[in-house]
Amino acid sequence: MALPQAKLTATEDRLARLSMPEAPGWSALPRAAALARVETMGLPGRRDEYWRFTNPADLVAADPVPSTHHARQKTQVFDQMDRVRLVFVDGVFDAAASDDPALAGVEITRLAEAQEQDIHWAADLYGTLEAQGHEPVERPLAALNTAYATDGVLIRATGKAEKPVNLVYFHESETSDAILHHVIKVESGADLTVLENGPAAARFNKVMEVDVADGGAFHHVRSQGRDHDRRAVTHIFARLGAESLFKSFTMTVNGALTRNECIIDMTGDNGVAHVAGACLGDGDFLHDDTVFITHDAENCESRQVFKKVLKNGATGVFQGKILVQPGAQKTDGYQISQSLLLDDDSQFLAKPELEIYADDVACSHGSTSGAIDETALFYLRSRGVPKSEAVDLMVLSFLAEAIEEIESEEIREEIVERLSRWLSRHRG
């Protein structure tokens, strides 16, 4: 079926600005297949069902909207932790600013270097989970990433990592258009934590493919903030084996347009997948969480917990789905999306979904939107708490359920501290 002319033109204009890396080695075939997917699907438009709440125009335009960059802060999130930093500046790896990858106790190579080899373990994964993630929903911006990614990290954990791996993204060019692709393989019984932070680029397209084998554990904590003009689309594609654990949390503040997609396929019995997010939006801000979790094995647990606090016309979007396949008995699926609107100009758009083909399951979803509880606010003020501080306390309490999904107490405290600072700067 031919693409509509508007979609065809937009796709051709975007592809004309891109070129595949030279000598891609083993990545040549998955890149070519991904490009074919893009050309068949076309880049997303506002009429596409999964984009009707979020206008993708800035993400698919031939050139990025210029974004004023910010100087590097002396203190970054996660700086108090003992971790291994791998730094990218506008999508380009900065070896001088990075730590020695070997300190993490896991195998780490750069995509740009590894793809020049004839054989690499990532050859079996690069683009594989992304390709599978298009059923039943097309995700052409992820396919675009697989085809044209300039760099990324390939991480393989065969045991418990000695330190978390921290991917740090700096933004220094007002017209940078970064495309990064990470592949992570957690072997049976291994344990890995990946941290991400930084504005990355004027426009950022990132894909992370995560394969967690039987008994493996993957922890992911991401901080998106600082850059008011940031436009970003990210995808996490995960495949979970038996008795495996996947936990991902994202904190988002600022940014003109952010779309985070998470697609998880639970293929082994007794797996656990938790995806959570806490979002603070002010003014010209649109934040979209789109999640699709497929239960295709018995006795698996999934949780989706998303909280958004919006004011001054900010917009929040949540699209979450739990699909329980035939035979996936004893499934425990939980989904909650809530927004706290601090004024009448902001809005929250939600589309929670359950699709169940097994008869012995416990699945639930809920979505609510509301204002500050005036009774609770009065209670705090009557005890001498200034109104602005009382509102901040109530906001943090509202976000607590999502933050509690972070397993590390140290990281939870760091996230709460960062959110508290943002609230104090944006009072009024």
Image (tube, rainbow, N blue to C red):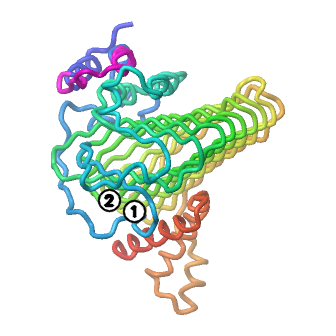
State whether residue 195 is above or below residue 424.
above
The quadrant in which residue 322 appears is top right
- Which corner quadrant holds the N terminus? top left
Q: Is residue 23 magenta?
A: yes
- Whole-percent x, y for residue 126 in the image: 44, 27
State whether residue 2 is above or below residue 61.
above
Q: Nearer the viewer, residue 308 or 260?
A: 260
Are the residues tagged 1 and 2 within 8 Å (C-beta)? yes
- Whole-percent x, y for residue 407 in the image: 61, 59
Kind of residue at disc 2: Gly
> At 34% from the left edge and 55% from the top edge, which residue is drawn?
99
> At 51% from the left edge and 88% from the top edge, which residue is drawn?
385
Estimate the spatial distance between the alpha carbons at disc 1 and disc 2, rounded to whole Å. 6 Å
Question: Badge 1: how crowded within 10 Å, few (<14), some, or many (20+)?
Answer: many
- Whole-percent x, y for residue 306 in the image: 55, 52
- Which corner quadrant holds the C terminus? bottom left
Q: Which residues are magenta?
A: 16-36
Q: Nearer the viewer, residue 109 or 258?
A: 109
> At 29% from the left edge and 22% from the top edge, which residue is drawn?
24
> At 57% from the left edge and 71% from the top edge, which residue is drawn?
373
Please, what secondary structure does the residue beneath circle 1 have? strand
Please, what secondary structure does the residue beneath circle 2 have? loop
The main secondary structure of the magenta stretch is: helix
Say which residue label 1 marks.
311
Q: Is residue 66 left or right of residue 203?
A: left
Q: Nearer the viewer, residue 140 or 18?
A: 18
Question: Badge 2: how crowded within 10 Å, few (<14), some, or many (20+)?
Answer: some
Say which residue label 2 marks.
283
Kind of residue at disc 1: Lys
Q: Is residue 28 left or right of residue 368?
A: left
Q: Is residue 45 in view?
A: no
